Image: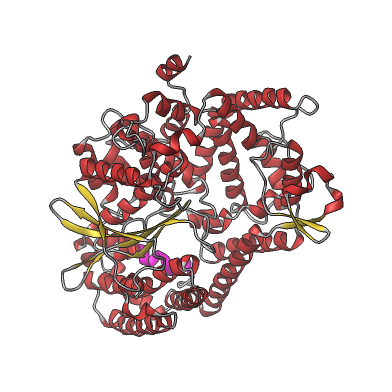
Amino acid sequence: GLFGVPELSCPEGFQEAQDKALQESEQLVQKACSTPPGPETVMIFDQLSDSLCRVADLADFVKVAHPDFAFREAAEEACRNIGTVVEKLNTNVELCQSLRRLLADETVMSSLDPETRRVAELFMFDFEISGIHLDEEKRKKAVDLNVRILDLCNEFLIGSHIPNKIDKHVLPEHIRYNFTAEGNYLQVAGLHADCPDDLVREAAYKIFLHSNAQQLARLEELLASRNSLAQLVGYDTFAHRALQGTMAKNPETVRQFLEKLSEQLSKRTQKDFQMMTKMKMKLNPHNSMLMPWDHPYYSGVLRAERYNIDPGLYCPFFSLGACMEGLNSLFSQLLGISLYAEQTKRGEIWSEDVRKLAVVHETEGLLGYIYCDFFQRPDKPHQDCHFTVRGGRLKENGEYQLPVVVLMLSLPNSARGAPTLLSPGMMENLFHEMGHAMHSMLGRTRYQHVTGTRCPTDFAEVPSILMEYFANDYRVVNQFARHYKTGQPLPKNMVSRLCESKKVCAAADMQLQVFYAVLDQIYHGKHPLKKSTTEILKETQEKVYGLPYVPNTAWQLRFSHLVGYGAKYYSYLMSRAVASMVWKQCFAQNPFDRAMGERYRREMLAHGGGKEPMLMVQGMLQKSPSVEDFVDALVSDLDHDFETFIMDS
């Protein structure tokens, strides 16, 4: 069966696994309601969470990645059914009472360790978000809103990817071949950001981002429903609710962080825009005004012109085997951990190119398993991500339930007999996703509810982004980057050029991220919104980003992150700030420092989500960073390295 789960040898097995989980959860609910308040209450709640997550998490992965449609459909169904049960449990008054009795008992609470206390509070938070403390009528309203929000999220996600059609005669003949023809229509399915023809990018931008009444209505209803739900359960805005328990803690801190970052970036961003405008004038003298469809293209042109970083020059040094060896060697030096390939049993994997790795510590033994689903295949989503399939936890019999994760990448399939070669970007993504996997393996918490990457969103990206700093350090790269034919190491100046090239127009790129994050905060802030979502977009774009808004476009309707990262889009920037501080303070001097590796494990990885994120950061940096520290860390990363500059001149 899939992942060694016997029921899942066929799609119908999902029904069986789901029924088993639901039966188990019913028994646990009864047990929770009849147990006197004590640490056992938290254990039972966590078992309950585990029995449902073991099916739901696995199904979450299978529904997007399994090549067999029947498996995907069965998994989708299981996700929906378990989701409904979770909604019901979150509004089960009797179940909530048993937890409330524990939280109200000061004697028992003071005898619990901090992790158990935090987990109890997190479970209570789930109840409160579902409106458990409200009367029957309002509680029913909360459930209905939750269901409606789920539907709207799915509809908005689908709508955000749907191509737009246009009558082909509207476009000049010489650019039509760039788009897919369908009878008399052309389909525009994306922004064509890398196309050298300005006109193609302009047409794609205006058509793909053209406003759509249906999608607009979905977004407006989604934002209004989120706001109603947040207010119903006692928060000022949806952002206040979403930021509870995060590193930022509240929307005010996020606003401060984004405003100060924007201030610090503004001069550099103007400089970047001037460089792009010059380049555009050089290549296109008739039309030199910089527009939003120019930014990604001309920053790429500047990068390529200033530093010769053609991926073709780098790929031969980054064979997949060499990169995996590099990760193995880094983990072994920093953390005493090795990765071993394991044989899989029949039916355990969903595609024959999936590899299973055992993660083994030199003294603690087996820590868990990583399934590597690295290669492109039809129907597989084109995204790099990390899935928790089973969370770690301490079982009732004293054994540890080993975590199981999947790392999904979209690497090209190699030619026969040749190794798979990664571009520098793919190599960095592999390191990034491995950072998540290590968090899952080393976040060995007692409770499954806070294991590994089950932590606040703005902390979850810290371990993965930190790995990008390792991937960009010559001392690390030099350990594994070898030409697959000659064995020659990757020259140092090539690594330096690559790192410096990433700083070209990096301020403007970061400013764009700040704009998205600000937009997300406004949309999830005070309601009713003062203006339409499109007017807010226009105003914010001109104020925060600086490139003109294009009439009749509505970029926000393609902003799919509003679904999974509602009010939390800033997380990526804040995680990067923390990762940058950890790198500079703890690893920049020696990226293989074992004592630092152990401190990193002890202070940041080991707790999963079982400790307040700011306390973990404090433990690692041995000080409590301010918003200004975060901003300085991000901005100082944009400075060019003088030594490389001289070498290349």
Looking at the rendering, the stretch of residues picked out in magenta corresponds to: 122-130
Q: Is residue 500 above or below residue 415?
A: above
Q: 85 or 498, which lies in front?
A: 498
Number of numbered discs overlaid on the protein picture = 0
The percent coordinates of residue 49 (x first, y second) are 35, 71
Give the left or right position of residue 264, taking residue 349 as reference.
right
Give the left or right position of residue 73, taking residue 487 as reference.
right
Q: Residue at x 37, y 68 (%)?
A: 349
Give the left or right position of residue 552, taking residue 606 as reference.
right
The percent coordinates of residue 396 (x first, y second) are 19, 73
Q: Residue at x 56, y 59 (%)?
A: 563
The percent coordinates of residue 504 (x first, y second) are 54, 28
Quadrant where the image shows the N terminus: bottom left
Q: Residue at x 59, y 24 (%)?
A: 267
Residue 625 seen: no
Residue located farthest toward the front when viewing the structure as drawn: 417
489 in the magenta segment: no
Q: 464 or 321, which lies in front?
A: 321
Residue 420 seen: yes
Q: 37 or 271, which lies in front?
A: 271
Q: Is residue 189 above or below residue 599?
A: below
Q: Is residue 383 above or below residue 514?
A: below
